[in-house]
């Protein structure tokens, strides 16, 4: 089992949207970065766990825990001309973009803020991709030791 951090802007799709989804489950789609796509296609598997992270908001941080329930599979938003994630170069026989399903396991008791994470970046969270300068990936792996430590911050 692997661990992940999934970034989302709460104004676009946040933990409240996931909690309101049927079965608290939805496809995690619309990823249009090749490195993040490779994580989805090559590494993310059912049973993996994920932190839900709200970005581009007043208080960026980890807000919940989810589990991967299905995937990877072709991201159908790439084929829909009406979807903002449409990609005319993608084809169904050899998809360029992939998706996976997640299920909300729980909300955290409080947001573990980006600032709180940064206070530990030279010790317990050294190497956490989220804290690397210039990192803008919406999906990043989380090492087991980082996962366990972050949960203690709740």
Image: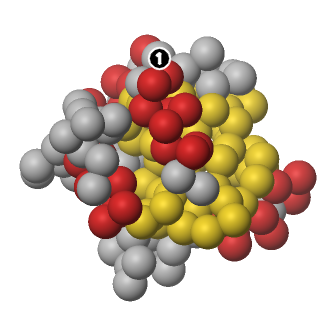
Q: Is residue 142 above or below residue 29?
A: above
Element type where label 1 sits in the image: loop
Can you give x and y, in whole percent of width and height, for residue 126 in the image? 24, 34
- Describe residue 73's horizontal placement relative to residue 112 as left or right: right
Nearer-the-camera pick, 138 or 113 = 113
- Total labels: the figure holds 1
Please state the horizontal and vertical placement of residue 154, each as a whole percent of the image.
60, 56
Q: Quadrant of residue 121?
A: top left
Find disc 1 in the rendering and name its residue: 43
- Residue lying at the far left of the rendered structure: 133
Q: Is residue 9 left or right of residue 105?
A: left
Rendered location of residue 57, percent (x, y): 39, 79
Residue depicted at 43% across the width and 32% down the height = 146
The one nearer the camera, 87 or 19, is 19
- Residue sitting at 41 percent across and 78 percent down? 59
Q: In this rendering, does residue 92 appear at all? A: no
Work out whether residue 63 or residue 77 is closer to the camera in this orientation and state it: 63
Q: Quadrant of residue 94?
A: top left
Q: Is residue 49 left or right of residue 37?
A: right
Image spot of residue 135 (x, y percent): 19, 47
User: Could you say which quadrant of the image residue 140 lies in?
Assistant: top left
Q: Residue furthest bottom?
A: 58
The answer to whether one can see residue 153 in this image is yes
> Residue shown at 87%/58% (left/top)?
22
Give neighbour class at mark 1: few <14, some 14-19, many 20+ (Cα, 10 Å): few
């Amino acid at each position: 089992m692997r661990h992940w951090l999934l970034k989302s802007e709460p104004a676009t799709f946040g933990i409240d949207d996931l909690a309101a989804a049927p079965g608290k489950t939805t496809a995690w789609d619309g990823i249009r970065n090749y490195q993040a796509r490779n994580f989805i296609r090559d590494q993310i598997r059912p049973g993996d766990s994920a932190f839900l992270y709200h970005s581009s908001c007043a208080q960026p941080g980890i807000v919940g825990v989810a589990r991967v329930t299905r995937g990877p599979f072709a991201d159908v938003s790439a084929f829909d001309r009406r979807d903002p994630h449409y990609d005319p170069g993608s084809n169904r026989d050899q998809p360029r973009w992939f998706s996976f399903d997640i299920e909300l396991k729980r909300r955290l008791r409080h947001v573990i803020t980006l600032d709180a994470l940064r206070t530990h970046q030279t010790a317990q969270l050294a190497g956490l991709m989220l804290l690397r300068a210039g990192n803008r990936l919406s999906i990043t792996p989380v090492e087991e030791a980082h996962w366990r430590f972050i949960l203690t911050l709740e």
